[in-house]
Amino acid sequence: MIVDMLRNVWREEVLSYRYGKQVAFFALFAAIFFGGYQGYTWHKMTREKAAQYAVAEAIDELDKANYYLLDAKEQNIQLAQQYLKDAQLAFDVVKNSHGSSDLAPYALAFEADIALRQGDNKTALELLDKAVNAMSSKDMLYGMMQIKRALVRIDTADVAGGVAELEKYAADKKNPQADTAAFYLGYYYMTADKIADAVRVWTALRDSMKNVDKQSAVSPWLAIVEDKLQQLGA
């Protein structure tokens, strides 16, 4: 599956890249501690704090499942499946008890991850649709959620729809996650043996960085993309 493939890419290449750990940490930090902005009322702050604790507990169960999934022994797989069920129940608590929280859409997204691990791509896509629809376009991870939904769409046999979404997100100059969309789109094309399209997408990403003045604004994917382009002779 394309999502499994990209998960391996994330582990083997992205996390080994010097910016990869920062990107992964930022995404997890934002998912757990999103909320509590200055100016919120005391009620909302209290509500968000309670939701944060609930999400953190659910993620803890999911982390345990991920730990045991690393070892393919039968007893560990059984433990992993149990922890996945526990995590799903915990995220259900977040949805049911903290449905008005800013974290509620992320509970849906994590449940989509669980569905993917259980091989239920259709349910995962439905959950991601709900998550995206429940989020504000101003949410810092809104674009990332759209990208993930597009990748899952590819895995649910809607390849054309998923690829079209990634093309759209990658080409949108106002999209702060355009570089991430381009990275995954190019990787999809490469694994699908559509080398010309991979080169097109990644070259556009590389070229878009030429006029970037601040080092902090350079895409964290750039070094990986440049290496891949070199391997492809572009």
Image: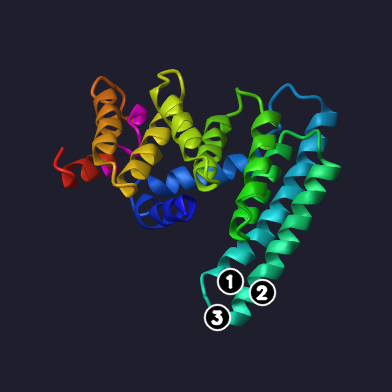
Q: Position of residue 69 (x, y in %)?
A: 56, 69
Q: Where does label 2 land, which residue? A: 79
Question: Could you tell which of marks 1 and 2 lies nearer the N-terminus?
Answer: 1
* Mark carried by residue 68: 1
- Please provide the residue range marked out in magenta: 216-224
Q: Nearer the viewer, residue 153 or 99?
A: 153
- Where is 4 relative to 196, above or below? below
Tell me the CA gap for discs 1 and 2. Answer: 7 Å
Q: Position of residue 206 (x, y in %)?
A: 26, 30
Dot 1: few (<14), some (14–19), or many (≥20) neighbours within 10 Å?
A: some
* Mark carried by residue 73: 3
- Where is 160 relative to 13, above or below? above
Dot 3: few (<14), some (14–19), or many (≥20) neighbours within 10 Å?
A: few
Residue drawn where x is 67% and y is 68% of the image? 81
* Mark carried by residue 85: none
Instruction: Determine whether the residue tagged by mark 2 lies in a helix, strand or loop.
Output: helix
